[in-house]
Image (cartoon, rainbow, N blue to C red):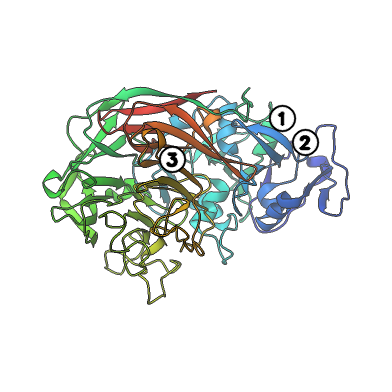
Amino acid sequence: MRYRWFILTGALLLALAFLIPAMPAHRTTLAQTSERCFTETDYCIAGRIREYWEQNGGLPVFGLPITPQREEVIEGQPLQVQWFERNRLELHPENARPYDVLLGRLGVDTLEQQGRDWFAFPRSDAAEAGCLYFAETGQNVCGPILSAWRANGLELDGAPGKTTAENLALFGLPISPAQTERLDDGNEYTVQWFERARFEVHPENAPPFDVLLGLLGNSIQQNGGPVPPAPATDPNAWPVIQMSDPVSGAERPTTITHAGDGSGRLFITEQVGRIRIIEDGQLLPTPFLDISNRVSCCGERGLLSVVFPPNFTSKQYFYIDYTDTNGDTVIARYFVAADNPNIAEPASEQVILRIEQPFANHNGGQLAFGPEDGYLYIGMGDGGGGGDPQQNAQNRQSLLGKILRINVEGNTGGQPYTIPGTNPFARDATARPEVWALGLRNPWRFAFDQVTGDLYIGDVGQDFMEEINVQPASSTGGENYGWRVVEGDRCFVEEDCDTSGFTAPTITYDHAGGRCSVTGGVVYRGREFPVMYGTYLYADYCSGDIWGLRQRDGEWQNQLLQDSTLVVSTFGYGEDGNIYIGDYNTGQIYRITATQ
């Protein structure tokens, strides 16, 4: 019988050589001092891959190496990778630790290799008793599989125990329910598929050996290699983008997002105070929410953002950022109607935070939940007036000109929100504890990379420069991006200014060619367009220029992708992994497609 799995447990189990499947003839030379070699397969691990393998579970978690470290093209990118019985480790030197090593999505890849569509698996709309529910995929994880899932994870924070973020980093989201399948030994087992793993229940074994992990790395290598096959593409090529599948009818779109509930719906905020739904390619006639009577519009005011919390399906509420009729910023929670998932209750408002605005412009407006910490991030402009006359952006006692980070989903003790203990100024009496980053003029749109956790901030400039700031996922906050001492990478107030202590922008551009205002975008992490994978798309509101920004070998590359005629007000993700873009003037929403 083929040896198909390793035990999911902290105990280190060594596989016997005769139990290992036949391997390719080529072997890595043994006994290098920086290497760790395995006689069972005659392969070695070294360098960062060895360090990562040893720090995050080793043999029980990843299995034995079954290839040397080598270059492969993965989703359009040339990467140094090494295959193990359970997974594939990929080196990404452009990312800060621990995200410089990423895991392959072998659960998804194996199903694709088998010709199975995991989107077709049954889904649930709610949590089951004693289970952990994932609204992103509509799946519950229960019983011994849940125990095994919680007991293991990648080491991200150095603290004892495993957090949900660490569990997710190792296994990914569940993509199937627990179901009976016949495996390659001819027997039937209860299994559950995850993005990066397959859990198998073996009741004939005593705990903790009653839950085993399938050797998906072996399976893929023995059945034709990585899936999908490496695309025939130039890894240095930039995508040629097109605006596809336009949907009309929205008015002044400011946000495009999804609820993560498996419905495939897109939610569009209209600056005038409405949230609209696009379902099956059609704009629904009835607004999801209409609070236009509470919203001050327009200019830079209005309904500026909507965000859905993790596990929205079981919570049925969401958060918005809008300008009230007094001209102040309001962050509020609203609930979905009990009898109609496409209608929210205007009367259900719960105000989380209200911030006084001294002028009518520079309201910021973006909301996002951190993909790893689950906290709510809020973009606040400097209060406006031109040149930050109140000097709010550098004033740590002001919430203006900042990115804020607050806890609205955990235990808040009956308060609208609490301060995460890891906020950079949580214990600093000279600063507002909500502040995560400062020195921003008007961070109109920002977004997290859903794979790396890096935060991309598009900060609108004044007279000369626009900028993108990339805050790595490893950041502990407190970055000062320099406004109003600097605008982009040049001094604003003085000819020769002191920039010590400031974090320089990742990329800047000037106002030549009719450019005037950056619209921050999103990083493409879908699978349909490999040439665009890992590229951050952003635009200029006035010129319609759309750029791509990416990192290669530790260096940032920036490329104009299209000189469009759009008035780009926003970008967003769909549940399908696609990027969508909104035209402020026409109200049209497009899907961005790409070719090489």
Instruction: State the image quarter where residue 236 is shown.
Output: top right
Could you tell which of marks 3 and 2 lies nearer the N-terminus? Answer: 2
Disc 1: which residue: 222
Q: Indicate which disc residue 21 carries.
A: 2
**Which secondary structure lies at badge 3?**
strand
Residue at 27% in and 68% down: 414
Q: In 3D space, how far apart are the residues under numbered discs 2 and 1 (Cα atoms)?
A: 9 Å
Residue closest to the eye, 512 or 441: 512
Disc 2 element: loop
Can you tell which mark lies on residue 35? none
Any part of residue 431 in sight: yes
Q: Is residue 499 left or right of residue 379?
A: right
Label 3 belongs to which residue? Answer: 522
Residues at badges 2 and 1 in contact (C-beta under 8 Å)?
yes
Q: Nearer the viewer, residue 104 or 451?
A: 451
Q: Amino acid at mark 3?
A: Val
Eyeballing the image, is 349 above or below 449? below
